[in-house]
Amino acid sequence: MRHCKGVSSQFEQLANFPEYNDASKLIAEGSFHQALPLVQRMNEVIASSVGSDTALAAATRLRLAAVHRLMGDRTSALASTEVDGIHGPARIYLLLGRIGLLLEDGQFDAADAAAIDVVQLTEAQPHEQIDISTFCGAYTAEGLAAACKGRLEDAEDAFQRAARWGAEPVDPLLPSLNLGRLHWWRGDLAAK
């Protein structure tokens, strides 16, 4: 799943850490095991200095999850996106990453529950903290989880909401593509 603007901007801040740049080079080379300790260290430093509830901490944990995923360690990837004790926008960002992992693993019930949670959190964001870019991601996640559970009308509704709530010009493209796939799966686009 694509990252929301609020967490994507944090990756730019992470570039100020030498460990991040070194880890990025190692990841690009496919040296995931060598990159892992650098990302783990960065995660520990950021969590202890700015707190776990920040968008910067969420970005670091999502990066850690990505490295675990690339190493084939799905359990650690999911653990990196655990949201117990995390609040605010950081919880939303981590849930969106977690839903993608759950869907990839075929854990559709857990993904569906997380999608319901992320939509509720997104819609209840305090006005002063609102990140509009989370709406498209939350509704897309809801649609994907609903489609995987066979609730195709719910998926269609969620994809339509995601397409309307895109904060960036490119945001409606992914939910529109998913909506098209959904119609194709249902046979709505079959030649007559």
Image (cartoon, rainbow, N blue to C red):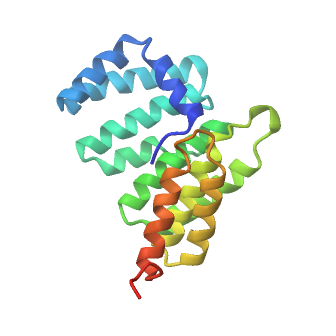
In the rendered image, residue 115, in percent from the top left (x then y), is placed at 58, 59
In the rendered image, residue 110, in percent from the top left (x then y), is placed at 50, 64
Q: Decide: is 118 above or below 111.
A: above
Name the quadrant of the C terminus.
bottom left
In this view, which residue lies farthest toward the front? 192
In the rendered image, residue 41, in percent from the top left (x then y), is placed at 38, 21
Q: Decide: is 111 above or below 173.
A: below
Identified at 65% across, 54% down, the residue is 164
How many labels were placed on the picture? 0
Q: Decide: is 2 above or below 53.
A: below
Identified at 50% across, 17% down, the residue is 13
Residue 34: which quarter of the image? top left
Residue 35: which quarter of the image? top left
Residue 63: which quarter of the image? top left
In this view, which residue lies farthest toward the right? 127
Identified at 49% across, 75% down, the residue is 149
Relative to 172, is 98 on the left or the right?
Answer: left
Relative to 82, is 32 on the left or the right?
Answer: left
Identified at 42% across, 16% down, the residue is 15
In the rendered image, residue 26, in percent from the top left (x then y), is placed at 22, 24
Q: Is residue 110 visible in this depiction of the protein?
A: no
Q: Is residue 79 visible in this depiction of the protein?
A: yes
Residues 192 and 80: in front is 192
